[in-house]
Amino acid sequence: MQRVDVAFMLELVPQELVGLRTVVIDVLRATSTIVAALSAGAPYVVPVETAAAARELAEQFADVGGCYLGGERHRVRLSGFDFGNSPLEYLELPAAKPIVFTTTNGTRALKRALGSEEILIASLGNGAAVAEALLAADGEVLLVCSGTRGQIAAEDVLGAGLIVEEMQNRAAIEMTDAARIALASWQQAKDALTDFLLQTSSGQGLSRLGFQQDVIHAAAVNHSDVVPCFSAGRIQCDR
Ligand code: MLT
């Protein structure tokens, strides 16, 4: 029986990840944006930690067809970047170019998951597809909630709960207590999800800056069947 655990924030991710299959979740908004970009036909996303590294890397793409620069600091698009961190901006990409991407917490979370057997990327939009991919292979699962600057973010816990529920609907799984808490939170919130997300700390912060539609988009469940995988520095869909 597959064992499923949840780390409610990066600080709770164990040091030793060997043998674990991890899923990085940052519902508001990095992983919702990555799912949107790959669903819209971006070939791959290259996550980098700093804006300077993103700009430098983008220059290297100049000779090979170019790329888009995407990302935020303080939730706002970085100067000179093509896109911010709004999933809505990525729904219709002008061209199928790779995206060099940097965000405050999401790209940190991806780095934290390095060393695990496999790193998948999930939002509420592709939870069922990720659950199916997890069940298709053996190995203990750790759902990694990105959180926000060292705080638990409720929307990420709900994302983890959705995946636990989708796995449980398809197979018998062994849940840790953290997985049970995520599942219970999800089951309590799922019928009024948009309102719940709008009330979260990130939801309120985004709404104040005019990004309320991003929160509404992020609350749409299981609309995408992409299963992004982070490997060799790139996030892409292999299945
Ligand atoms: C992040 O990765 O820190 C978040 O997705 C921030 C944001 O909402 O833009």
Image: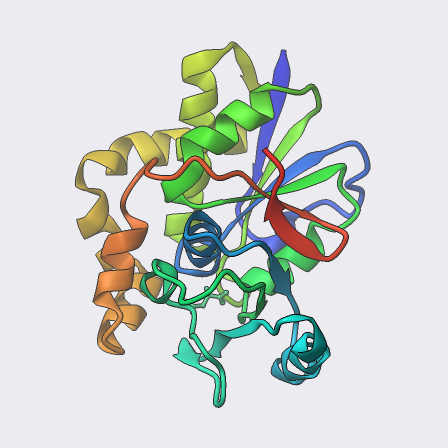
Colouring: rainbow
Residue at the spot 21% in from the left edge and 49% down from the top edge: 194
Compare residues 66 and 223 and report the one nearer the observer: 66
Q: Position of residue 87 (x, y in %)?
A: 37, 61
Residue at the spot 46% in from the left edge and 30% down from the top edge: 129
- Residue that extends furthest to the bottom in the rendered view of this protein: 79
Taking the image as shown, residue 167 lies to the left or right of residue 133, namely left
Q: Position of residue 68 (x, y in %)?
A: 53, 72
Relative to 230, residue 97 above or below: below
Residue at the spot 79% in from the left edge and 32% down from the top edge: 19
Compare residues 152 and 30 and report the one nearer the observer: 30
Query: Where on the picture, by quarter, is residue 6?
Result: top right
Compare residues 143 and 130 and report the one nearer the observer: 130
Residue 159: tell me if it is visible.
yes
Residue 158: tell me if it is visible.
no
Q: Position of residue 169 (x, y in %)?
A: 40, 15
Q: Position of residue 28 (x, y in %)?
A: 39, 59
Work out which quarter of the rendered image holds the N terminus and state it: top right
